[in-house]
Image (cartoon, rainbow, N blue to C red):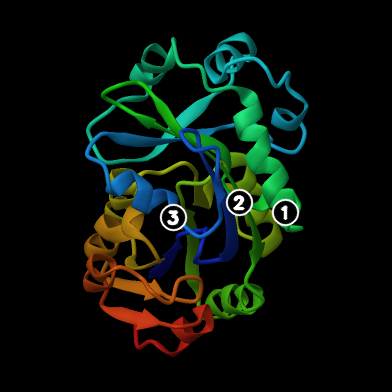
Amino acid sequence: MKAVVFDNSGTLISRYRAIKNLNSGIIYDNISSIDLVDEHPHRALVVLQTDPSSCLINARPDQTIHQFIVRNKVPFDISYSSSDVQKDEILPLIKNENAEISDIQDTIHAVSNKNYNVQICSGSGFIVNTRSGDIEFTITAGGKIFPEVSEVVEELKKRSFHIYVASGDRTKSLMELASYIHIPSENVFGTADAQRKREIVAGLKERYKVMMVGNSANDILALKEADMGVITTQQDKETSRKVMEAADVVVGNIKEILDIDF
């Protein structure tokens, strides 16, 4: 039996990401959250497991991010980090941080103004310096499914492939994606960091021959673990060298995986 494991953002989804630098106040849409984490030895990308378009956007803007999480018992996960940090360390780290919910709301507005659907990607979160406890960036990401995805998934099913999604994105948004492309919810693994993706692929290899399809540094370990690692550059034409070197095959469009001899 064979299985394909897809990353989400940039692989199945054309993403648009708004990132606010809390030091300068500038909102960027041309930088990668993964790259921001990688460029510093002590950073973590934290994803809030709550709906940006209904919960976060309507929250009181002047409360701190720490207050919002604690008061509302908002679940969160570490999607990617450049150092060894555990989830239970995050709240104590940011307890005295002054970053506010308004800083996240600014990025939600930036994404919404581009007419992207924030329900179908990672949602909102922040990048924290795990040494100082400073929240350095806030983030919201939205996305649109690449037009070829439904056709690719249906063809893979016809060929008796089992389809999985392993992504660092918000779990609920991935469930909505699963419904759209008609795969079982139990085949979806949300807010999976690089190590977790590798573990997912390793576990599936006990039952299947596994192809991993991704596009960023968060996929490197899983690409290397898989029987075949595939990088798609449909979102990012200038994919980093270390990501490219982790792959067995590079494709420019997700549809091209159907032509791979696997």
Residue 98 appears in view:
yes
Q: Earlier in the sequence, mark 2 or mark 3?
A: 3
Give the alpha-carbon distance from disc 2 to disc 1, as whole Å.
8 Å
Residue found 25% across the figure and 34% down from its top: 42
Whole-percent x and y of residue 60?
73, 18
The circle on residue 32 is 3
Q: Which circle, 2 or 3, is nearer the viewer?
A: 3
Q: Which circle, 3 or 1, is nearer the viewer?
A: 3
Vertically, is 118 above or below 235?
A: above
Q: Which residue is mark 1?
A: 117
Please state, as top left, top right, bottom left or bottom right, where the N terminus lies in the image: bottom left
Q: Which residue is mark 2?
A: 121
Characterize the local packing of mark 1: few (<14), some (14-19) or many (20 or more) Cα atoms within 10 angstroms.
Answer: some
Residue found 33% across the figure and 67% down from its top: 210
- Mark 2 near mark 1, Cβ–Cβ under 8 Å? yes
Q: Secondary structure at mark 1?
A: loop
Which amino acid type is shown beneath numbered disc 2?
Cys
Q: Nearer the viewer, residue 248 or 53?
A: 53
Whole-percent x and y of residue 54?
77, 33
Please state, as top left, top right, bottom left or bottom right, where the C terminus lies in the image: bottom left
Which amino acid type is shown beneath numbered disc 1?
Asn
